[in-house]
Amino acid sequence: MKVFLKTLYGKISAIFLILLLILGSVQIFVSVTSSVNYVCEASQKLHYSVAENLARKFQNVIHDSLEFSQLQEEFAELLMLNPRAEVYLLDHHGAVLKAFNDSHTLKRNQVNLTPVMRFLDEDSYKSFPIKGDDPISDSRKKVFSAAELILPNGMPGYIYVILPSARFELASDGILNSYILSTSAFALSVTLIFAIIIGLVLFFLLTKRLHAMTGAVKNFELGKYDMRIDIGSEDEVGELGRAFNNMADTIEQYVSALEKNDHLRRELIANVSHDLRSPLASIQGYLETILMKNEVLSSSERKNFLELSLKNVINLNKLVHELFELSKLDARQTEPEMEPFSIAELIQDVVLKFQPESERRKIHLITRLPVNLPFVRGDIGMIERVLSNLIENALHFTPKEGRITIGLERIDKNIRISVSDTGEGIPEEDLPHIFDRFYRVEKSRSRNSGGSGLGLAIACKMVRLHKSELQVSSRLRSGSTFSFSLPTHQMEMEYASQD
Ligand code: ADP
């Protein structure tokens, strides 16, 4: 029971039952009181002239002295009609001069005359039932009939008849069991029972949804992040369910982002340690060989080992540098320093840098730069880094006699920069991943052949800092095109003036 009362359903049901009990009691009290009052009123109206008749008869026999023996006959008649009627003769102060029904002992000798005066008032009918003091009780009040007469001393007196309809007698007479009362009590009980059953069922249905919600929240707490609540109807409980579902969506997104980040972090550590270990192991191997076989090694062999070691050190240095660059970009420590510059000139400079390499590899490095292009706005250092990476990759993946074309194109208020090659291309399934750090299409490609898998990740982040996206389109054995856009200087100026 205690446990039941601790539940919301238990509490609501208990409060509901208590309320119904109070309401029922009030209803019964009001019905009984009004029934009793109604009977009292009816009795008083019915017996309104009893006292008046008696007073008339009394007046005829009262002359010089109070001679009550002659009244016994009238009194016996009244008692026959109304055996419980009690008749009193009062003086003008309300003092009881005579009690005609001596089966009771008097508890008070004085009756308050105010209700008697009200009864005798012309309009008294309207305020029935009027209750007056009952001389055989200390405190009880009863309905009565009263009439005025003149006593032998010339002073007014009153015939005061207590009627047998007072509340206590009515109760003992079984008025509470009267037809009307028992019918209304029955109707009330049926209504209450119905209200209780319907109320309990409704509360159960209402709290059932809350139970389902609690279950969902508990499951969510245990890690079932896909748990959602069936909203059902659009009431407050439904609203709560919707709010929970929205919250669950957000948490699920955060959790999956955290899991993804954690996965990336582990992968990063694994990749970094792998990429550091292999060149370090090679360097260690070459140096140990030189030390151990110093005497037997020819000078060209020694030079070869040293050159290989140096190449590994350069690659290591590049890897560490790129990692540092990427972590700074991740931590948003690198902010682009925006300035206007000629993108065509920058491309020419970068192409010049790669000219010897392209000639060595017999690859045609072509530029398609329209004249009179406006300046773009961006961080020159970053854009140069992006272009270098794209051209370096293109050179790496394009065979002899292939072509690398660097083009510029004006699109609205932007300039699109593209680097296309006629190289081996990228398989479709790898395209979505090539901007991920450490991702290489050729998994076996080692540091020795160059390429840490970080170049495109860095380029992509740098382009994003310029509010653009690095895009790629590629066909296997046909070539690839990487492109991004930069805003023209005028457009930036227009934006600035609008602000
Ligand atoms: P890496 O430094 O290893 O080249 P990147 O991040 O620059 O790393 O490139 C990721 C991968 O994308 C490369 O390993 C390569 O497989 C593929 N890739 C990039 N550019 C090209 C290209 N122009 N042609 C073919 N594949 C490319």
Image (spheres, helix red, strand yellow):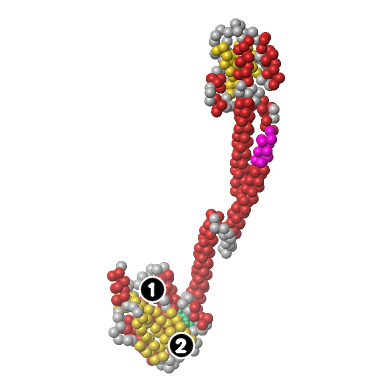
- Tell me if 227 is positioned left or right of 469 in this view: right
Badge 2: few (under 14), some or many (20 or more) residues near its Cα, within 10 Å? many
Q: Earlier in the sequence, mark 1 or mark 2?
A: 1
Q: Against 183, is 54 above or below?
A: above
- The residue that label 2 is drawn on is 479
Picture quadrant where residue 154 is located: top right
Q: Nearer the viewer, residue 171 or 423?
A: 171
Q: Residue drawn at (45%, 85%), measured in percent from left and top?
A: 480
Residue 292 in view of the camera: no
Q: Amino acid at mark 2?
A: Gly
The answer to whether marks 1 and 2 mark residues whose Cβ atoms lie closer than 8 Å is: no
Mark 2, ligand 1, within 8 Å: the answer is yes
Q: Nearer the viewer, residue 100 or 316?
A: 100
Can you give x and y, in whole percent of width and height, for residue 207 in the image?
60, 52
Tell me the SS state at disc 2.
Answer: strand
The residue carrying pointer 1 sits among few (fewer than 14), some (14 to 19) or many (20 or more) residues within 10 Å by Cα, namely few
In the structure shown, which secondary structural element does the residue marked by tag 1 occupy? loop
- Quarter of the image for residue 228 reads bottom right
Q: Quadrant of the C terminus?
A: bottom left
Task: Specify the quadrant that holds the N terminus.
Answer: top right
Residues in magenta, as a range: 178-189
Residue under label 1, please give it.
467
Q: Residue at x 55, y 18 (%)?
A: 113
Q: In the image, is residue 290 part of the stretch drawn in magenta?
A: no
Q: Is residue 323 above or below residue 230?
A: below
Q: Which mark is residue 281?
A: none
